[in-house]
Amino acid sequence: MGHVAKIYLYYEDPWWHDEIFVKFILWNDEKRKQMEADPAKRWLLGYYTAVEVEHKPKVLCLWMTGPYVTEMEQVPEEEFNNKTLHFVNQFFGKSYNLTQPSIIKRTMWNTNDNFRGTYSYRSITSDSKNAQNKDLAEPIMKNDRPVVLFAGEATDEHFSTVHGAIHSGWREADRLIKLY
């Protein structure tokens, strides 16, 4: 399981106008190598898509995943805003007449001590290892009795959802009821 973050940019005058805006970010090998070598910019490689927020026509959402998320959350606000705007200009400035956002907000779930993450998602690595959510739900056993139980949306077939989190709690509560 990895990290996920969202960055919201609010524009008084959206530059993407009336089109349905969904763009995927692809880095060429040379640029990727340059960015990887620069710790101050490496986190920008985590951006993978830009999409207009449904029913919020003035808000653009940038999605970020992977180990870059925790790096991004450590970047000071002003530096983060400047580099994000540079990123947007780099990828969209040639095709659109860009305007400046009036607000930039980012999620900080991964470095927040109360949360330490967002929700789980399937990765290519987990799929290649045939890792299943049900594997995470297996209790630690001692003398044929569970001594540690695991709940949470990552342990349920409906991962990444609130109902998956709730269902996993019910599942483990039922397991305890059957024991006692």
Image (cartoon, rainbow, N blue to C red):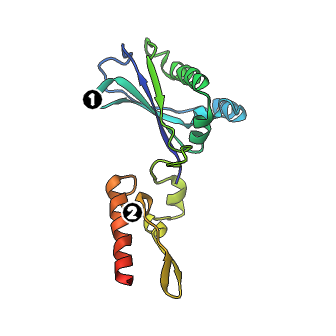
Q: Estimate the x, y position of residue 160 in percent, counting from the top left.
A: 40, 52
Crowding at label 2, few (<14), some or many (≥20) Cα neighbours within 10 Å? many
Q: Position of residue 19 (x, y in %)?
A: 31, 22
Residue 173 picture quarter: bottom left
Residue indicated by mark 2: 156
Q: Is residue 150 above or below residue 175?
A: above
Single out the residue that lies furthest toward the right: 37
To which quarter of the image does residue 86 belong? top right
Q: Is residue 57 left or right of residue 111?
A: left
Residue 158 makes an appearance in the image: no
Q: Nearer the viewer, residue 12 or 94?
A: 12
Position in image of residue 57 (x %, y %): 31, 23
Task: Identify the residue at horizontal 47%, vertical 73% (top origin).
Answer: 138
Whole-angstrom CA distance, mark 1 to mark 2, is 30 Å
Q: CB of mark 1 within 8 Å of CB of mark 2?
A: no
- At a point 49% along the width and 87% down the height, the residue shown is 144
Residue in view at x 37 percent, y 58 percent: 165
Depicted 47 relative to depicted 168: above or below: above
Quarter of the image for residue 29 reads top right
Q: What's the amino acid at mark 2?
A: Asp
